[in-house]
Amino acid sequence: MPLNLPNLITWLRIVLIPLFIGLYYLPNTWISVETRDAAATAIFVFAAATDWLDGWLARRLNQMSAFGAFLDPVADKLMVAAALIVLLHLGRVESVVALIIIGREIAVSALREWMAKVGQAKSVAVATIGKLKTASQMIAIPLLLYGEPLGGAVDGQWLGTILINVAAVLTVASMLYYLRKALPHAAL
């Protein structure tokens, strides 16, 4: 396992997950709901920013590695799954939406692993629809975590709900896209 700056940043993202979840176990006498939600939102946004940063640094510093390529999406999926479970617990996301997004992440990860084993990893490389899904959920999740109106003008819950539902639809569409790409390589 190469220990370089991009991989350390990815590990930091994984280490932030227990801190993120731990905020929701603190008694309300220790931290107000508003402060808790703001802190959780800040942690999630910071983690999302480090996702971009570790990839940029890996390319810029020429420190790309197979381990980093493996660990980066794992860290992303763990953080998104943790956030969706928290949002489900808070009643800010529907269970079907959380199941669709988390289930797709597991299924596509397994599909990519299988395609790599049969030498067809490029067939299921990240596509535009997957990037749109990620963008939608990475905007929706902080809005839903924060749970308060933004600047008094925008209902963050409403906008976050719309975007997470869009992400769920794109999640299904992207999974079907990846399955269609993999189908010709399936041994029937």
Image: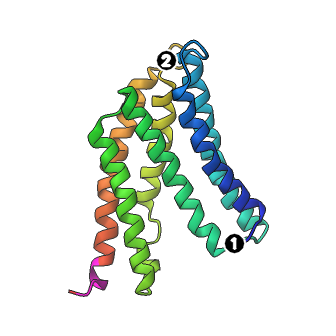
Q: Earlier in the sequence, mark 1 or mark 2?
A: 1
- Residue at image location 34% in from the left, 68% down from the top: 178
According to the image, label 1 marks what residue? Answer: 1
Q: Position of residue 48 (x, y in %)?
A: 60, 46
- Residue at image location 59% in from the left, 61% down from the top: 72
Q: Which residues are magenta?
A: 183-187
Q: Secondary structure at mark 2?
A: loop
Q: Quadrant of the N terminus?
A: bottom right
Along the viewing direction, whichever of 22 and 79 lies nearer the viewer: 22
The chosen color scheme is rainbow
**Which image quadrant is residue 123 in?**
bottom left
Tell me the mark number nearer the camera, choosing from 1 and 2.
1
Tag 2: residue type? Pro
Compared with residue 2, is residue 56 higher up or lower down, i.e. above or below? above
Q: Position of residue 86 (x, y in %)?
A: 44, 34
- Residue at image location 53% in from the left, 36% down from the top: 21
Along the viewing direction, whichever of 66 and 53 lies nearer the viewer: 66
**Which image quadrant is residue 41 in?**
top right
Residue extending farthest left: 188
Give the left or right position of residue 4, taking residue 127 as reference.
right
Tag 1: residue type? Met
Cα distance, mark 1 to mark 2?
44 Å
Compared with residue 10, is residue 151 higher up or lower down, i.e. above or below? above
State yes or no: residue 86 in magenta. no
Q: Taken as a whole, is the magenta stretch helix, strand or loop?
A: helix
State yes or no: residue 186 in magenta. yes
Q: Quadrant of the C terminus?
A: bottom left
Crowding at dot 2, Cα within 10 Å, few <14 / some 14-19 / many 20+, comes out as: some
Q: Position of residue 143 (x, y in %)?
A: 49, 30
Which mark, residue 149? 2
